[in-house]
Amino acid sequence: MNAPLPLSRTSGPDCGPVLKEKGQREVFCGLTGIIWLHRKMQDAFFLVVGSRTCAHLLQSAAGVMIFAEPRFGTAIMEERDLAGLADANDELDRIVEQLLARRPEIKTLFLVGSCPSEVIKLDLAKAAQRLGAKHAPDVRILNYSGSGIETTFTEGEDACLASLVPEMHELPADAAPNLVIVGSLPDIVEDQFRRLFGKLGITNVGSLPERAVADLPGIGPNTRYLLAQPFLGDTAQYLNERGARRIDALFPFGVEGTSDWIGAAAEAFGIDTARVAELLAPYQERARTAIAHQRERLEGRSIFFMPDSQLEVPLARFLANELGMVLTEVGTPYLHQGHMARELAAMPAGVQLSEGQDVDRQLDRVRGIRPDLTVCGLGLANPLESEGLSTKWAIELVFSPIHGFDQAGDLAELFARPLRRRDVLRV
Ligand code: SF4
């Protein structure tokens, strides 16, 4: 049996200087987040105010999954809107009227900005206010931007969750302490975490987002929150401004990350360390066994992360520390020094980090290194595969349940699969 992993780590080796890149980017825009957010928030509808390109992106990303009336759509701005010949606000009001009349089950409507709405400077905050006043209290109307000018694909979730923070009700200074899990997780994973916290005696637990927006937890000076996703910088900032405090922890990927994440919350809530260790031991053991099945294939293999989802740093830490993979370069679109400090300290020494993107220069480095596996966007995967390099689509990591003990084996498997395929092809 392996020695139990420490529940917290306060220092670690220096990861060296971060390579800052600025140039052409190859990532999806923030509208992509709607694909998983609409599944999570079951009383919400996402109305993209955009072009046919935006509608096409959503349809092709989610198309195969639509079998009932979808909870997202696009209010298409035509050329005359873009040329300022029609009043886009009137048009938007008309579409919202029609939508809400037809779909009375919608309780929260997000007006989602796009490149075209931004270019013509359509003020969606004002539109949300105007329409919100008209439809209150039946429907709350919020807005955020998912435009490719402002956001990369996981930043759409950040913008959406940030727009929900003002909807959380105020808790007084003498309210009982509460814990908020921040980040959209598949229901099954969220339920696992809540059960674990419950067993530890932390029962006042809410999520941002909740399945119904009306059930959002309250927030006040006794609120502590855990980030479940590493791309929620703005949301965290808004939560801080409302008096909540972030619990510093690794992100809950793998045994090490999940143990640290739960352990840090337990510490913040004054739970006895021995009790935490005892409760987590069987979960850790099961997860280690599941991971061990993939270790044989992944140990010693090299991996290169192109910047894409902001999940790169914690995933790289998991792959290096628990599966023995060799990190050649870990790129991330944005490195939040505060939220990532603990992750960086837990990484092996000397890892090359890069922040931002200059896609051509980065591809040159991939070709020079020829790693066993490259994690990248869909658009880059095919060309690299045709050059004999194995790839993993970054977006799959955002869509799949990968957090927590029970998913640790599946997470490792996601990286092992393309290597297995390549090995089979070689045979
Ligand atoms: Fe394209 Fe911009 Fe629409 Fe995204 S928001 S699909 S980048 S036009």
Image (cartoon, rainbow, N blue to C red):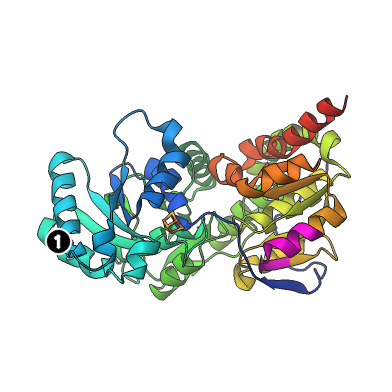
Q: Quadrant of residue 280?
A: top right
Q: Residue at x 20, y 40 (%)?
A: 105
Residue range in magenta is 354-364
Q: Percent from the top left, x then y, of residue 307? A: 66, 59
Q: Residue at x 22, y 63 (%)?
A: 128
Q: Is residue 357 above or below residue 183?
A: below
Residue marked by disc 1: 90
Q: Is residue 390 something that shows in the picture?
A: no
Image quarter where the N terminus lies is top right
| Disc 1 element | helix
Q: Percent from the top left, x then y, of residue 145? A: 38, 63
Q: Is residue 146 above or below residue 198?
A: below
Q: Percent from the top left, x then y, of residue 232? A: 51, 62
Quarter of image, ligand 1:
bottom left
- Looking at this view, is 371 or 173 the one in front? 371
* Residue 419 is inside the magenta segment: no
